[in-house]
Amino acid sequence: MGRAKHRSSAETRLKGVPLAPGVAVGRPCFYELHHAEPDSASQAGPQRETQRLGNSLRWLARQRSVLARKAEARLGPAHAEIFDAHRLMLADESFQSQLLRVIEVKDCSAEEAVETELNRYMEQFEAADSDYLRQRGADIREIQQALLGYLNRRVACRHCRDVAACSVGHCRQGNDHILVGAEISASLPIETDKHTIGFIVEKAGPNCHAVILARALGYPVIGNIRELPGCIPPDAQILVNGDTGEVILDPTEETLSRYQSVFTTGGQSLQHSEPVPGLKVMANIEQSADVHDAIAAGAEGVGLYRTEMELLAAGRLLSEAEQAARYREVVKAMAGKPVCIRLLDLGADKTAQWLATTQQGHAVARQRGARLLLARPELLREQARALARASKHGPIHVLYPMIVDVRQFIELRALFDQAVADLQPRGLQHGVLFEVPAACLAARQIMQVADFGCIGTNDLVQYLFAEDRGGGGVSGHTCFETDALLWELIQQLSQVARQAGKPMAICGELAGNTDFTCRILQAGISAISTSPSRIAKVRRAAQI
Ligand code: PEP
Ligand code: MG
């Protein structure tokens, strides 16, 4: 909990508005948002400015895509829609052409076009009658600031008493801290590291997306504290009470002991739980550092490591050595427990400019998962070699994404084996992610040659019912997760695996939804992979 010092001097109390419940104590970390002014000096003619604008829009759309996937993994598809909406706005043709028109007509810089045009949008939202619409103005501001940040090549940074500047999501000090800032952006609660345990903001409403996300992640948030950050000394210890809106600076020992039993651990409210008989619960992770959450939650393994997120987060391809280092970290940390590492599931919405650099260009980037790996064997080769190197440190199960038939799996496996022939990998298992209906229909054949299977319910639901990911139950559509056809398919896959004498796990949103835990067990599946924060809940649901 990071209470470095207990003080006996008088404490100071500030009163704000409670926006998200919970109580936490930590050091202040001051978060600076971009306040980039339009930089007219950078103007280099309409053609160049148009190009700069296009680059910034594409960059931000990709960044939002990564955030959407992170939000989906931690909170489910409804929360991912916040970032998907940002992405759709950035890709909207009339939005883009309006910005381009401003550059042409005003003969101004990309920064100035972003500043003036998005200010116009914000004014429209701020003039709305409904509070809900007024709070959407915050999304426009976030998009504006991020674009300006990119164009000016500035990054948001955080600083505390001890360190001049850390990048968002990486506290170099490792102190538990309360983020203090004028505003809170929607990306912030998703991007912060495990040391962040609460937020104090000057301006925010209960319905802005940033607060909705912070609340869902379990962070206490207090708004409307005036004269921030000046009213909080950098060396203070702060107690935030998100239930009452109270901020206590340098709480006395008496105060701390009064709150002792109610301290939350913010977004990292990872409850540890012990395994339950008859059900193996593993963790989904997206980056190697997430393995510590898996361990803290008591996961019986890593059931899904979405390795493409490492590349998307880095914004570039990673070398064999860089990938091997990440996989090694996870495998070593899991100390003998199985680690299921998915081959790169890139393409479609998880794409990036750096992916389409070879002769085939965009046509390749539009393919996804297995198909993309077959079209870009050098990607598979590097990753296979990295996995083979990491396999010396513990058991690795390699999961093949978006497989459509047995031929595709055999072809990829052959390429994998070829790539690692000189490395003598140790005990690698190769399995298929059943997430495309065609592969499910071919499951009997596939399970003859695969070592294990895993049902990926997110894409399976999408492709089975022609429904956008996250559409069911979120936008008022039918919830396909309860459809009898889906459950018949899950049951069939489980039966096929049993007959082949091979394990079959389940992952995706449905797997972590406790409404379905018993149904999963009844379908004959006894291995679930879900986000670390849901492991304890799933285990509890299995015992009812
Ligand atoms: C799935 O489709 O269910 C799955 C686990 O993969 P992702 O969500 O990464 O597409
Ligand atoms: Mg999938």
Image: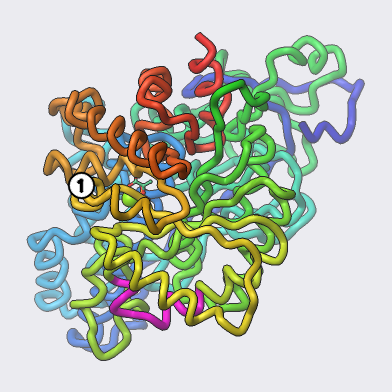
Q: Which residue corresponds to the image point at 89% horizontal and 25% vertical from the top-left?
A: 7
Q: On the rendered structure, is 517 left or right of 176?
A: left
Q: Which residues are magenta?
A: 372-383
Q: Which residue corresponds to the image point at 23% horizontal and 61% vertical from the top-left?
A: 116
Q: On the rendered structure, is 536 left or right of 249?
A: left
Q: Amino acid at mark 1?
A: Leu
Closer-to-camera residue (313/408): 408
> In the image, residue 200 lies at what x, y percent?
57, 33
Q: On the rendered structure, is 315 left or right of 332?
A: left
Closer-to-camera residue (503/4): 503
Dot 1 surroundings within 10 Å: few (below 14), some, or many (20 or more)? some
Above or below, 481 relative to 195: above
Q: Secondary structure at mark 1?
A: helix
> In the image, residue 515 lies at what x, y percent?
37, 18
Q: Which residue corresponds to the image point at 29% horizontal and 54% vertical from the top-left?
A: 445
> In the image, residue 64 lies at what x, y percent?
34, 55
Closer-to-camera residue (497/403): 497
Q: Is residue 62 visible?
A: yes
Q: Is residue 142 visible?
A: no
Closer-to-camera residue (369/138): 369
Q: Which residue is mark 1?
A: 441
Above or below, 302 relative to 223: below
Q: Which residue corresponds to the image point at 19% horizontal and 24% vertical from the top-left?
A: 484
> In the image, residue 105 lies at what x, y percent?
9, 75
Residue 339 falls inside the magenta stretch: no
Disc 1: residue Cβ within 8 A of ligand 1's nearest atom: no
